[in-house]
Amino acid sequence: MIDVLLTDDHALVRTGIRRLLEDSGEVRVAGEANNGEEGVALAQKLNPDVILMDVNMPGIGGVEACRRILQRDPAQKIIVLTIHNEQTFPKRMLEIGAKGYLTKECDVDEMLMAIKQVYNGGAYIAPSIAQQLALSLLPGNEHNPIDRLSRREFQVMLMISHGLTNTEISEKLCLSPKTVSTYRLRLLDKLGAQNEVDLVKIAVEQGMVEFASSPD
């Protein structure tokens, strides 16, 4: 039996995934977390065999949660399960150390295959995602502007796109407000943006959020 930790901010989604996995008789859902902070805490408490991790969640989100979990335990096996199928998130999450990447369009058979493959020491990337990543490496393809961002810049931009203030971002990422302000200025410069509204628009265009309202 493979013990899995579900980390997703939608209770209905977690319930559906739990039923599908446990009906297989091969997987047991050891715990559920509804945000990144809970995911980090339960990963340490339960030490699951595999973690299914969403990306966009309240709090620190899936990107930072994944980083913190793997910083504490590099051997932890994380599979990203999200609606995002653009190459921006797969590249970031795989660079951090995730072992798998699935979209929520997958069926239960593919999810089970990914869990078993990762549990047994392998990796799994949904075919559509793998194709995008491969094509992005071909000569002549334009580079995604988001790729120019450092890991921390990417995290700050993601939080900006969700409407968090400098103070809120500094608390989530354990940075000073002054440092967060510096990251904001770097984002404007690197992405050729004039203001925060432009940053949010870029985030939406690049698939970093399902929906982001432009700040006033």
Image (cartoon, rainbow, N blue to C red):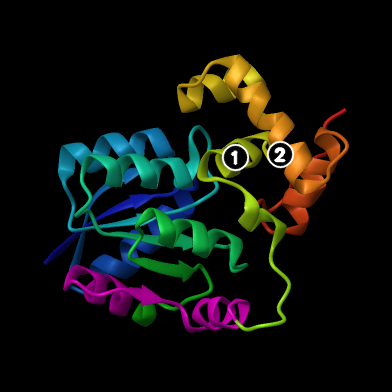
Amino acid of disc 1: Glu
In this image, 37 relative to 47: left or right? right
Quadrant housing the N terminus: bottom left
Which image quadrant is residue 89 in? bottom right
Labelled pair 1, 2 in contact (Cβ < 8 Å): yes
Q: Earlier in the sequence, mark 1 or mark 2?
A: 1
Residue 178, how many percent across, how many down? 62, 15
143 to 43, vertically: above or below: below
In percent of the image, x 17 and y 58: which residue is there?
A: 49
Quadrant housing the C terminus: top right
Furthest-front residue in this view: 139
Residue 5, how many percent across, how many down? 27, 52
Q: Secondary structure at mark 2?
A: helix
Identify residue for label 2: 187
Amino acid of disc 2: Leu
Please provide the residue range marked out in magenta: 111-137
Circle 2 packing at 10 Å, graded few (<14), some (14-19), many (20+), is: many
117 to 53, vertically: above or below: below
Residue 135, how many percent across, how many down? 60, 83
Question: Is residue 113 rendered magenta in the image?
Answer: yes
Identify residue for label 1: 153
